[in-house]
Amino acid sequence: MPRRSAPSLRAELPDGTRIERNSKPGLNGREPYGSWYWLVYDPDRHPARKRVNLRTKDHGAAMRKALEYSEAYRTGTFDPWTDAAAATSTVDVAATMYLDAQRRAGRAPRTVDAARRLLDGFARSLPPATAVRHIERHHVEAFVDAPKPGRDGKPGPPKSPSTRRRYLAVLRHFFAYCVERGLGRTDPTRGIQAGPSRPNRRDHLAEHEEAVLVRTIRAAEVAEGRSYRWLLDWLAFGIHTGLRPGEQAGLMWSAVRLREGFIEVGRGHRVKTRGSVRPVELSPTAEAVLKRLDAERVTEADSPVFTMPGGGPVEVGYLTKRFKKFATRAGIEKNIVAYSLRHTFGTRALLAGGNPAAVAGTLGTSLQMVQDHYGHYERQAGRGLVGRVFGGTPLDGYGLPSSPTEEEARAVTGESRQGHGKDVR
């Protein structure tokens, strides 16, 4: 049996650097083990030789990665002595750093946990120990476009456009963090499209639709012989404050300032971000809801303002089911969910001519978000602004609608001459 030739353990690059691989004694001489690494020599540095783990056992892949490092080293954008740790940071390591940064930034635990699950799935879809710098666009597309996990290891249904957008949003934020920290050079999500969004995902309620919905819920109380007071309270308060469903569900009595006429969102309960902590002024309707609920309290201990009929915490998913049911029964052909109440507040505020910056402050979000999601309502409210400010009969003197008489002209000319102290004839 012919003896198998020993595989190559090193290869030179055009710039004089090389790739190498560790070896150990075997039946056919020295046999390679472990991943390839890139070796750089500079007698003026300490240590003089620096190795960068390429994290692959494939010779071709190792050569491609080494050539990439070699070019970056030549142009001065990568230093093996200082950037090697960043260059070999895997998605798992970078994800841990990213999630810690998100927690320190005050992100809600549920948001951080959702990002953790998504990044864990993305890391599993990659070859083992893949460095962030080696992730390319096709890796992201394969993960985002893959069907949902099914049962018994079989693929499930395809992801909806909204799910793909959510995946891409998390990955874009993650890679932006990596680029900023030097863990990656470019964003591999750039240029990837998630597809068209589903229309009317969060519709708002016009005033007449709100009235019809309230009448429908009250009629259901009579027909079913049960109270939906808790749902009507939630509906009125949500529309008149613009709170996120999670903020309203977590609102505690310690955050209510009835005498001063406002609530402190974020006091005693979790919010989406640090920027979501804010005071919100109470409208007469919202204040009336709180006064009645306060009068019905059986204890002075701090507790949630809104509860389910049995006294338990509010389940936002159950709220959405109730709203959808009654909206359908009321003949409202819109996608009404729990979040629609916040959308209703923002829409009405801008249609009434509210300042977008003030609306953003009340909603606890950015001005950019308000302009992106409600900009068309702002423009609609601006129609007729010129007529309201500058309406009426056009002023004389612009050629409309009449010219000055000779007497008016002589009077003005005479005043002008007197003003100059001269009699020009």
Image (cartoon, grey):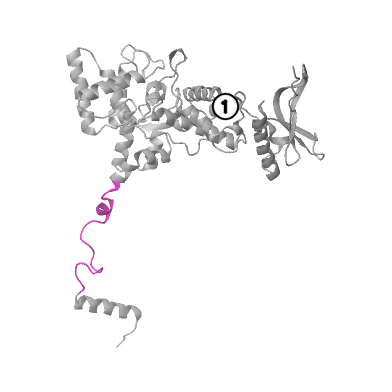
Q: Determine if the magenta segment contains residue 400.
A: yes
Q: Does 34 sit left or right of 309 as displayed?
A: right
* Magenta: main secondary structure: loop
The residue sitting at 45% across, 28% down in the picture is 145
Q: Quadrant of residue 175?
A: top right
Q: Name, please, the residue furthest toward the front.
A: 1
Which image quarter holds the N terminus?
A: top right
In this orientation, which residue lies closer to the viewer: 302 or 51? 51
The residue sitting at 31% across, 23% down in the picture is 234
In this orientation, which residue lies closer to the viewer: 120 or 247? 120
Q: Quadrant of residue 288?
A: top left
Q: Does 24 sit left or right of 179 as displayed?
A: right
Q: Does 181 sit left or right of 317 as displayed?
A: right
Which percent across, then down, holds residue 148? 43, 21
Which percent across, then down, holds residue 363? 39, 34
Which percent across, then down, holds residue 296? 30, 16
Above or below: residue 406 compared with residue 138: below
**Residue type, numbered disc 1:** Ala
The residue sitting at 52% across, 22% down in the picture is 121
Q: Quadrant of residue 78?
A: top right
Residue picked out by circle 1: 95
Magenta-highlighted residues: 381-404
